[in-house]
Image: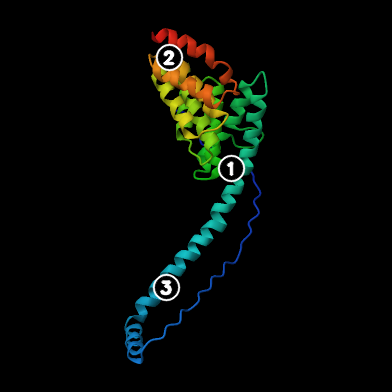
């Protein structure tokens, strides 16, 4: 499990808070009722008016409190988190495109130039969209640093509606387990990755990896089926160009 120090003092950030007045209006419904029914209704209202007014007041306070929380706490916190994330992502992108990348990945994780790194953002902005993305980027940073245990720890925490990122995070966990020579786990995560979504990039990528790992752990039939699926559905992918040789090899082994 990753360990890191919490930062005591927050770096200086300027946040502009904009408040909006929320005006809610309700429209009374009109009913045609008998005079006797109206009388009974009026008697009921008079009898229970304190209870009714109290309930309305409670609901109103709850709505006002929620709107205030959203406008004065959640929204500014999101903006602040995004501001911090931008610098960390900048270091991450530099690292991805750099030959000497370890120092940049470490800076992306731990921060620099008065800005938070991914670990700080995860710790200080829990629940924000920026923190969720920081979890993914932290996992990928550790994967690139060959710290596979920490890569798995963070990537397992990542969840998103974005199917591509979800597939990549699952597949990257498979990569980390493969590096740790835990092939059964690696195979399982590759299968999870290609099952998340059917697309031209991640599906053939992780079908192929699952096929290769599967062949090594005795899952020849499944591996052949994965390769044939690539051959049928993704013939123009990079993996599609490799399937014929692999299918022949595995079919020979399975005899």
Secondary structure state at the residue bearing disc 2 = helix
Please identify, in this view, whether the residue under mark 3 or under mark 1 is nearer the observer: 3
How was this image coloured? Answer: rainbow
Residue 58 location in percent, x, y? Answer: 41, 69
Residue highlighted by disc 1: 10
Which corner quadrant holds the C terminus? Answer: top left
> Is 249 positioned to the left or the right of 130 in the image?
left
Task: Please tell me which residue lies in front, 128 or 6.
Answer: 128
Please identify, in this view, whether the residue under mark 1 or under mark 2 is nearer the observer: 2
> Is 11 positioned to the left or the right of 212 in the image?
right
Task: Please tell me which residue lies in front, 16 or 159.
Answer: 159
Q: Mark 3 or mark 1: which comes first in sequence? A: 1
Residues at marks 2 and 3, CA–CA distance in whole angstroms = 66 Å
Secondary structure state at the residue bearing disc 3 = helix
Hey, which residue is sitting farthest front in the picture?
232
Identify the residue at horizontal 60%, vertical 30% (top origin): 108
Using the image, determine if residue 223 lies above or below residue 199: above
Q: Quadrant of residue 71?
A: bottom right
Q: Quadrant of residue 251?
A: top left
> Is 95 positioned to the left or the right of 8 in the image?
right
Residue 79 location in percent, x, y? Answer: 61, 48
Q: Are marks 2 and 3 in contact (CB under 8 Å)?
A: no
Residue 250 location in percent, x, y? Answer: 45, 11
Residue highlighted by disc 2: 215
Task: Please tell me which residue lies in front, 41 or 85.
Answer: 41
Instruction: Examine the rendering and report whether any part of residue 176 can be seen.
Output: no
Please identify, in this view, whether the residue under mark 2 or under mark 3 is nearer the observer: 2
Residue highlighted by disc 3: 56
């Amino acid at each position: 499990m990753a360990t890191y120090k919490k930062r005591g003092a927050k770096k200086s950030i300027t946040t502009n808070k904009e408040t909006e007045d929320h005006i809610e209006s309700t429209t009374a419904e009109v009913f045609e009722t008998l005079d006797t029914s109206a009388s009974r209704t009026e008697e009921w209202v008079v009898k229970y008016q304190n209870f009714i007014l109290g309930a309305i007041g409670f609901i109103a306070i709850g709505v006002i409190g929620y709107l205030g929380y959203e406008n004065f706490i959640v929204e500014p916190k999101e903006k602040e988190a995004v501001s911090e994330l931008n610098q960390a992502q900048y270091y991450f992108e530099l690292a991805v495109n750099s030959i000497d990348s370890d120092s940049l990945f470490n800076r992306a994780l731990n921060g620099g130039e008065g800005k938070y790194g991914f670990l700080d953002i995860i710790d200080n902005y829990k629940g924000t969209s920026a923190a969720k993305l920081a979890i993914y980027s932290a996992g990928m940073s550790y994967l690139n640093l060959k710290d596979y245990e920490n890569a798995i720890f963070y990537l397992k925490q990542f969840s998103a509606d974005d199917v591509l990122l979800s597939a990549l995070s699952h597949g990257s966990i498979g990569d980390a387990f493969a590096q740790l020579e835990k092939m059964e786990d690696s195979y399982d995560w590759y299968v999870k990755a290609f099952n998340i979504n059917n697309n031209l990039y991640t599906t053939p990528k992780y079908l192929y990896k699952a096929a290769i790992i599967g062949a090594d752990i005795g899952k020849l039939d499944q591996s052949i089926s994965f390769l044939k699926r690539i051959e049928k559905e993704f013939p123009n992918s990079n993996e599609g160009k490799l399937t014929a040789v692999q299918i022949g090899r595995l079919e020979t082994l399975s005899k």
